[in-house]
Amino acid sequence: MPIARFRPRLFDAMHGYGRADFGRDFGAGLTVAVVALPLAMAFAIASGLKPEAGIFTTIIAGFLIALLGGSRVQIGGPAGAFIVIVYGIVERYGVGNLIIATALSGVMLFLMGLFKLGTLVRFIPIAVIIGFTNGIAVLIALSQVKDFFGLRIEKMPSDFFGILGALWTHWDTVNPWALGVAAVSLLIVIGWQRWMPALGPKVQFSGKLSTVPGSIVALVLATAAVGLFALPVETIGSRFGGIPAALPEFRLPGFSWESARFLLMPTITLALLGAIESLLCARVADGVIGDRHDPNQELMAQGVANFVTPLFGGMPATGTIARTMTNVKSGARTPVAGMVHALALLVVILVAAPLASSIPLATLAAILMYVAWNMGEWHEFTHLKNYRMPYRVTLVGVFLLTVIFDLTVAVEFGILAACVTFIYRISNLTRSERLTASKHSALAGHEGQMQAWRLYGALFFGATRLVEELEDDLPSQVLVLDLKNVIYLDSTGAEALENLVRTCRKQGVRLIVSGLMNQPLDIASRTGLLALFTQHSAADVQPDVAAAIDAALADLAGAASSPEDTAPDHGSA
């Protein structure tokens, strides 16, 4: 298998790089840092970790993905798609095993990129992606109900029915102050970018203010309100004791093969989800900036980031669409913007970490509610009526399995359903056509003795019925089989043709094959099918159907003349 070349996009982006480019990248990086800060803390808390885990991930993984990645503008960091998976791993196996699973997923991602498997991610059907994305969005929103309403639940379950049961049991503990803070925060987040530009000249600096993310505005105002009025709501400080104003420490988790055995499926899930999210994000960014990313280099960068980050107290990371698009809209030109965004957050954590202690968790829950709503492609449910039943079953099935069970089961079901649907449709496209005298005049008058058939499409394990049908209705002397329009032949199709050859010879029918070329010819050669075709005569394989029909007619003529040639001998005897 060919090995990918390790060449970060940063090397190419530096050609002709000037002061003006750095200015645009610097401004874009600062803007993205402002957007990333509340999301990093919110994603970490929702995943069952301390808020600094999200910030450390944004700093370390964000810097490494920008430095080593295959995209000019990709921004890496913690993502909402990981919340459900990470929370489940932490609850079942603990934070130490989360570190192991994340590091192992990093190794897997690097190997996927190294062996050029980046393009395989594109083979995952869109119905599967939409289904699990919407399912994850529902679970994110559901997991934030506790802090949004200020419910007093010591530990939230990770499964769907457990979450519903916990919410129902503790519904009488609603904190009206927390609900008020969350509702106002959500209103600010939704309305800031939507209403501020509409004010236009009525409000001075409205254009510049609209560039400030609504999540930051809500975070600042809610934190100030909670501090000034001493509102009885839970904050980062009251739950986690604040955020350390120091660099993360390197730590190695305790490793055991017993733990690694149970972490296999979570590791695969983290790696696949990270690959899908990052490459989808890079493709979206390519469409906006008119560039083309290197998927294999991007996966290798994601692998390095996910291997290193957990060793410094981080969590899984991937490419993030919202922050990447903010980066693009802010004028980013190169990966330098992503590196600036990570370094800016590092400065914030060293200087202003104590201020984060007063951030209300209700506001972070409101921000995540908004993220979950934007994350889901809800309009796809209304469009289901435009698609066929297999697509509907796949999308809805993956969605429900993601919500009710887990993402691994959902993706497995989705890919299996998509494969079955694809096999069914391709098998229906494969067809056979009997050639008649209207198209080939030489066939006239030989209908009972000879048949000529042409196959179209892919002759694989899902379409061998066509060959079996030929066996059930063989002519008396010669069967011509034209394979010119067969674009694909697998081993099962080859075996079906072998059975046809044996059936024909058993019943004394000559089989003449024509039009073998390209992949079907290669498979026929390697499986011994071609040798079986020509076992009795090299004339049993012809270049085209016209030559095959001529050979068949010659055979019929020879069979017809044989009794006449031998008649005088019988008379003289």
Image: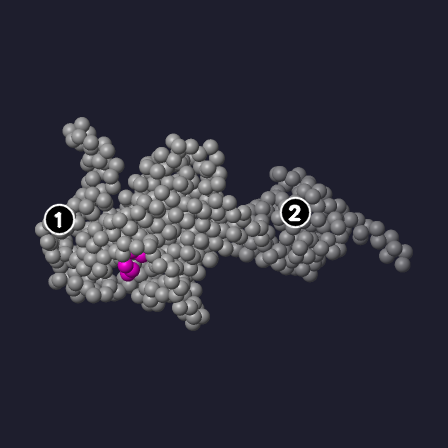
Task: Give the percent coordinates (x, y) of residue 334.
Answer: 41, 38
Q: Residue at x 62, y 49 (%)?
A: 520
Q: How is the image coloured?
A: one colour
C-alpha distance separating marks 1 and 2: 78 Å
In magenta segment, residue 564: no
Tell which residue pokes out farthest to the bottom in this image.
258
Tell me the crowding category of disc 2: few under 14, some 14 to 19, or many 20 or more residues within 10 angstroms, Cα based: many
Tell which residue pokes out farthest to the left in this image.
229
Three-letter code for the amino acid on which mark 1 is drawn: Ala
Residue 48 left/right relative to 18: left
Q: Residue at x 23, y 33 (%)?
A: 208
Residue toward you, 174 or 475: 174
- Is 522 above or below relative to 442? below
Q: Which residue is drawn at 48% across and 41% down?
A: 11
- Is 391 above or below relative to 290? below
Q: Which segment is the magenta one?
A: 48-54
In terms of sequence position, does the residue under pointer 1 or pointer 2 come before the other? Answer: 1
Residue occupied by mark 2: 516
Residue toward you, 551 or 425: 425
Q: Which residue is drawn at 55% across and 56% down?
A: 461
Residue toward you, 436 or 534: 534
Quadrant in which residue 503 is drawn: bottom right
Residue occupied by mark 1: 225
Are circles 1 and 2 on residues that touch, CB within 8 Å? no
Task: Give the percent coordinates (x, y) of residue 14.
Answer: 46, 37
Q: Residue 570 carries which label?
A: none
Quarter occupied by the C terminus = bottom right
Task: Give the percent coordinates (x, y) of residue 111.
Answer: 50, 55
Tell me the crowding category of disc 1: few under 14, some 14 to 19, or many 20 or more residues within 10 angstroms, Cα based: some
Q: What element carries label 1?
A: helix
Residue 384 left/right relative to 512: left
